Image (cartoon, helix red, strand yellow):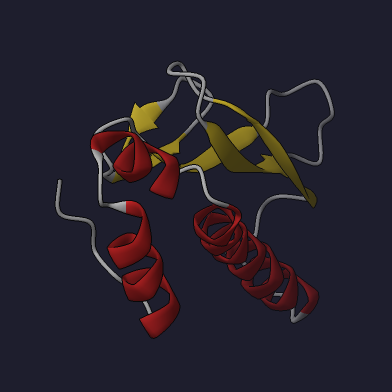
Amino acid sequence: MEPTFQSRKTVDLWAKMSADEAGEDEYFKNDLMLGLEKKVVDGIKKRYESKRKDGQPYCMFAETKVEKDLDQWGMKRWNIEFHWPDAGLKPFTVRVGIDPNGRVQHQAGADRLAV
């Protein structure tokens, strides 16, 4: 498994935890890694809300909501839901998580189409 490193902290964490296979698996469940996923989702929300506030015509969703859940492998992930002005419509959901093979995965849409 060869993860992509984002910072000195993640490199050091990998060096410490990858001494055995169990540690490699735990690396992707570590609070530091989950925090990076949360930063991605918060960044999407912040940027979208800013553009919506500025009145950008492509910002068609009325509200955004961030939440955490588990993916199909039982791994924690972060989601951002984009809610339509019509509350009767299903929200558009973007999911950010890491799959069991250590690859970052992004899924979008009410029907979970992978992007």
Which one is in front, 31 or 88?
31
Q: Compared with residue 18, is residue 48 higher up or lower down, i.e. above or below?
A: below
Which one is in front, 37 or 93?
37
Which one is in front, 21 or 52?
21
- Left or right, 34 with reference to 14: right
- Left or right, 45 with reference to 88: left
Quarter placement of the N terminus: top left
Give me the residue at 53% from left, 63% from top.
36
Give me the residue at 63% from left, 74% from top.
47
Instruction: Give the farthest residue toward the left.
Output: 2
Q: Compared with residue 63, is residue 46 higher up or lower down, i.e. above or below?
A: below
Q: Residue 67, how many percent across, how many down?
A: 74, 40
Give me the residue at 43% from left, 25% from top.
112
Instruction: Give the farthest residue toward the front.
Output: 19
Quarter placement of the C terminus: top left
Give me the residue at 28% from left, 42% from top.
102
Q: Residue 92, how many percent across, how many down?
A: 59, 35
- Left or right, 105 with reference to 30: left
User: Can you tell which quarter of the image residue 53 is in?
Assistant: bottom right
Q: Is residue 34 something one can see in this rendering?
A: yes
Q: Residue 18, how many percent across, how many down?
A: 27, 52
Q: Is residue 56 something one can see in this rendering?
A: no
Which one is in front, 59 or 68?
68
Q: How many marks?
A: 0
Q: Residue 103, how many percent across, how many down?
A: 26, 44
